[in-house]
Image (cartoon, grey):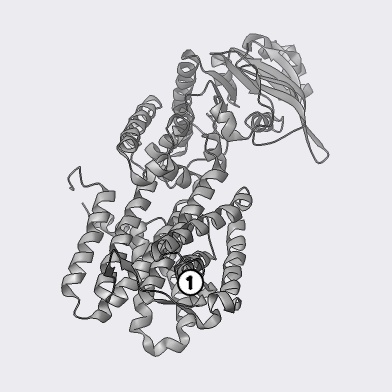
Amino acid sequence: MSAIAAEGIGISFGGLRALDGVSFAAEPGEVFSIIGPNGAGKTTLFNIISGLYRTGEGRVRLAGEDVTGLPPHLLAARGLSRTFQNLQVFFRMTAEENVMVGRHLRERQGLLAALLHLPWVARQNRATRDRARELLAFVGLAERARDPAGSLPYGALKRLEIARALAAEPRVLLLDEPAAGCNPVETEEIDRLIAAIAERGTTVVLVEHDMKLVMRISHRILVLNHGRMLAQGRPAEVRTNPEVIAAYLGRHGAEAAHAAG
Amino acid sequence: MAPAWLTPRRATVAGLALLLAALWLVFPSGFYFRIATLVWISALAAVGLNLLMGLAGQVSLGHAGFVGIGAYAVALGPRHLGLDLLPSLGLGLVLAGLLALLVGRPILRLRGHYLAVATLGLGILVWLVLNSEVAITGGPDGIQVQRLVLVGWRVAGAETWYWITGLALVLGVLVALNLEESPTGRALRALHDSEVAAAVAGIDVARAKLAVFVIAAVYAALAGGLLALFNRFVTPQAADFLHSIELVTMVVIGGMGSSLGAVVGAAVLTILPQALTVFHDYEHAVLGLTIILFMIFLRQGIVPSLAALLARRAP
């Protein structure tokens, strides 16, 4: 059974057909990448899968369960987590507190107990903080734990979002351009992180523009163009697919590549 | 460097308790205790409102409506329902909480500042009912409240009320700080910055906002009940729009997100009119001017600005 499966997803914004009949399935521990030119519908697909957009077309399944149309917090409870292309960090909280929020689902809730600060609430706070520290160390931000998130550089915030998403111990993690705006050193760091996350059995679905990164770490790749599926397969297959090359380089570029190849 | 056991939460509560004792030692007359009691009561409402505004980033423009419900519960419970004062106070808290639940449930599903508009209407509605249902509420002239008797002890005197309301405030601040240091508190601060990211982290955003709105309403109703018991008289002014704006101002000038700030804001707004009695005719204008000046020169509010200043000075 696939960890996550999308079946025939489609959506229109006004007259624009943003997605049309998109299907894919990713297995546990797999790094599955979705690539395509700007405006291909990658982030829209993420927003549908993670419950931010609703559409009448298609189904989404998590570990076999139909979760189509569920709101984000219920999807999170079923093991889905994500990061954002345009950062969605809690800027007024410290880095550590950001990750602590990510532990929300793993914490025992009790409003009355919280108001009275019962002993177990204090114990749980300490445990949550310890776990957040571990995750910050995992993404290489241990030294910045007590800093306000608003003071962290861009590349660090990308990793902070990954740490926050991991805090929920998701079975499926959607990463929306984790390497965008990062320098080569930071990109390499994210490369290492993704591989480590997948090794633990978490399914990683990745949207990314950095082709070198995608080709290096993906098990399989889905190529979108104008909201439609252009190709799907292993990195080696996708890289040599003439249609994919055409979409990325234009027809003229494809001919040039072909001539050169 | 502060010792490890002296967490900010404990330091704030201990500091407030010390302040209570210190003021008791230096205050020369009943007048001072009276003013301080009014400060503690306003501060209690402001601490609750700060949870809503400062933590969760939601605004209530009708919070005095909940103050009014608490105050009139104490006045009307014994008169019309034959209840004792304390059960009446309890009933007021429950009613305020239920009303917040009823109004907040549909509104807080929406993103944006719909709560401000809805509570504005709610506050005016409560005030209108208190004002016009003369047969029940006594109308604009107000209504008497019985003297509180606790197991045979007649609670009287500004000094006694100073301690009762002061301890209520200390407990109120403690509970507010407890909430901040809990999963719900973190959830509220998170959704203030990004509702989308909070939801993706598994937080039921609408439910968290509703919870804090109900809590803030109960704080306000408790303040209203104490105010009525202390004054032994209540008028619809307790619930009027200007009082709602005063409460918002207390939170804003004290410093959003700071419980201590809410107390400082309440002190400023309660003491200022006493000190500037010559301006009495222009009280509303002075209030407006205060808000404007703070928004221009001290946008963070008093307590966070001072904290930032101290942090810069520290090596």
- Label 1 is placed on what type of residue? Arg
Q: Position of residue B151 (x, y in %)?
A: 28, 63
Say few, some or many: other residues with alpha carbon within 10 Å of mark 1 (under 14 / 14 to 19 / 20 or more). Answer: some
Residue drawn at the location 29% of the way across and 73% of the way down: B36
- Label 1 is found on which chain of the structure? B
Q: Position of residue B239 (x, y in %)?
A: 51, 71
Q: Is residue A122 left or right of residue A163?
A: left
**In-front residue for pair A153/B217:** B217
Residue drawn at the location 54% of the way across and 24% of the way down: A79
Is the residue B138 above or below the residue A196 in the image?
below
**In-front residue for pair B114/B179:** B179
Q: Which residue, given by chain and number where applicable, does mark 1 sit on?
A: B79
Quadrant of the rendering where the C terminus of chain A is positioned: top right
Residue B253 can be seen, yes or no? no
Q: Is residue B86 left or right of residue B52?
A: left
Q: Is residue B17 left or right of residue B194?
A: left
Residue drawn at the location 44% of the way across and 42% of the way down: B184
Residue drawn at the location 19% of the way across and 65% of the way down: B21
Q: Position of residue B308 (x, y in %)?
A: 32, 57
Q: Position of residue A134 (x, y in %)?
A: 35, 27
Q: Quadrant of residue B225?
A: bottom left
Q: Quadrant of residue B251?
A: bottom left
